[in-house]
Image (cartoon, rainbow, N blue to C red):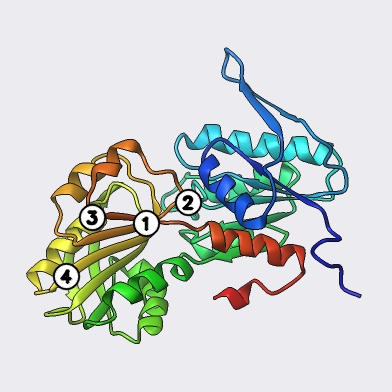
């Protein structure tokens, strides 16, 4: 007989990167956040103490490895080690935003594959499952030797975008060739055409949109990406779409990294709306962007945890 949800006790623990999201996930599951203390000593060392019995429980640690990424990564590893040593049944790392995911391969001689290094560290800390969302490179799942539940932000963004923009002709646009598969999936969901921006990158965080493959004239162009970092890629693509006659331009991404000149660029760009999720807490300075919409992933992550506990399918969510 299959083990029921109630027969497998579990705890939700939060790191310090996005406590609001962790609390929202716990609320959706009808449980309280696990009790723990995280301290930073004067020399920068992080100390963790689990303050309740977790023996035999499944533990889920909610922690995005966003800025400050190294501190948040160490917190995740230390929490995992503390829970493992406290005799939990299993420890799952719930990483809404996986830092270092862009370093997934060697792009030049004598460079690291840091995304693999992070996966090895997570494994060494004692985790035996990962739940993550919209990895920059899907093959990162293969860096782990245990199950990875890879969630897609489209499950959150599509209902919102469809309700707001499906009454007009829509084209889903990939801001570069690498994001074509992601954009193609969304285009199928909309039953809409696909366009691709041919981009040339001159250096890190520097991009120049060169050419558009597809038709956007008189249409609502939804620029779809996995993250918005410095916003250079999207603002260049928006200029191109405007020049090609798009009637509306909407930027949509799962992760609002928002670093460098992102605020200045987004404020001056031709976007009718910028849509992100709360995988990374929104910086205070970005709350003044009137065209910014933040969708929550808490129901999706909570349902994934619930299905894990019930041994039910997660892929059927998509």
Which mark is on residue 248?
A: 4
Q: What residue is shown with label 2? A: 279
Looking at the picture, tell me which residue is in the foreground, 32 or 222.
Answer: 32
How packed mark 4 is, by other alpha carbons closer than 10 Å (few <14, some 14-19, many 20 or more), is many
Q: Nearer the viewer, mark 4 or mark 3?
A: 3
Measure the alpha-carbon separation of dots 3 and 1: 11 Å
How packed mark 3 is, by other alpha carbons closer than 10 Å (few <14, some 14-19, many 20 or more), is some
Measure the alpha-carbon separation of dots 4 and 3: 13 Å
Of callouts 4 and 3, which one flags the residue occurring earlier in the amino acid sequence?
A: 4
Quadrant including the C terminus: bottom right
Residue 102, horizontal then vertical, whole percent: 44, 52
Looking at the picture, tell me which residue is in the foreground, 125 or 289.
Answer: 289
Q: Secondary structure at mark 3?
A: loop
Q: Given contact means CB atoms under 8 Å apart, are the residues at marks 2 and 3 in contact?
A: no
Query: In the figure, 184 relative to 96: above or below?
Result: below
Q: Secondary structure at mark 1?
A: strand
Q: Residue at the location (63% across, 50% down)?
A: 26
Residue 134, horizontal then vertical, whole percent: 49, 61
Q: What residue is shown with label 1? A: 276
Q: What residue is shown with label 3? A: 291
Measure the alpha-carbon separation of dots 2 and 3: 19 Å
Q: Given contact means CB atoms under 8 Å apart, are the residues at marks 3 and 1 in contact?
A: no
Of callouts 2 and 3, which one flags the residue occurring earlier in the amino acid sequence?
A: 2
Of callouts 4 and 1, which one flags the residue occurring earlier in the amino acid sequence?
A: 4
Of callouts 3 and 1, which one flags the residue occurring earlier in the amino acid sequence?
A: 1
Measure the alpha-carbon separation of dots 4 and 1: 17 Å
Residue 207: name its quadrant.
bottom left
């Amino acid at each position: 007989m299959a083990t029921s949800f109630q027969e497998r006790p579990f705890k939700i623990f939060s790191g310090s990167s996005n406590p609001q999201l962790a609390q929202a996930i716990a609320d959706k599951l009808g449980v309280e956040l696990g009790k723990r203390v995280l301290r930073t000593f004067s020399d920068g060392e992080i100390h963790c103490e689990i303050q309740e019995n977790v023996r035999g429980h499944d533990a889920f640690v909610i922690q995005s490895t966003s800025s400050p990424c190294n501190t948040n990564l160490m917190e995740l590893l230390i929490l995992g080690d503390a829970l493992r040593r406290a005799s939990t049944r299993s420890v799952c790392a719930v990483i809404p935003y996986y830092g270092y995911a862009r370093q997934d391969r060697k792009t030049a001689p004598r460079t690291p594959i840091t995304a693999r290094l992070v996966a090895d560290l997570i494994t060494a800390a004692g985790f035996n499952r990962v739940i993550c969302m919209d990895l920059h490179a899907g093959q990162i799942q293969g860096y782990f030797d245990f199950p990875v539940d890879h969630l897609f932000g489209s499950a959150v963004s599509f209902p919102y975008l469809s309700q707001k923009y499906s009454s007009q002709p829509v084209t889903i646009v990939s801001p570069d060739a690498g994001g074509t598969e992601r954009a193609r999936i969304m285009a199928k969901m909309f039953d809409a055409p696909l366009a691709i921006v041919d981009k040339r990158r001159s250096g890190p965080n520097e991009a120049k949109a060169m050419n558009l493959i597809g038709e956007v004239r008189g249409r609502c162009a939804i620029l779809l990406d996995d993250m918005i970092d410095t916003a250079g890629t999207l603002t260049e693509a928006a200029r191109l779409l405007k020049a090609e006659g798009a009637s509306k331009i909407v930027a949509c991404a799962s992760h609002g990294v928002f670093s460098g000149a992102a605020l200045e660029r987004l404020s001056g760009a031709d976007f009718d709306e910028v849509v992100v999720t709360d995988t990374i807490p929104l910086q205070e300075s970005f709350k003044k962007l009137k065209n910014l919409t933040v969708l929550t992933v808490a129901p999706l992550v909570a349902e994934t945890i619930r299905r894990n506990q019930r041994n039910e399918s997660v892929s059927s969510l998509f």
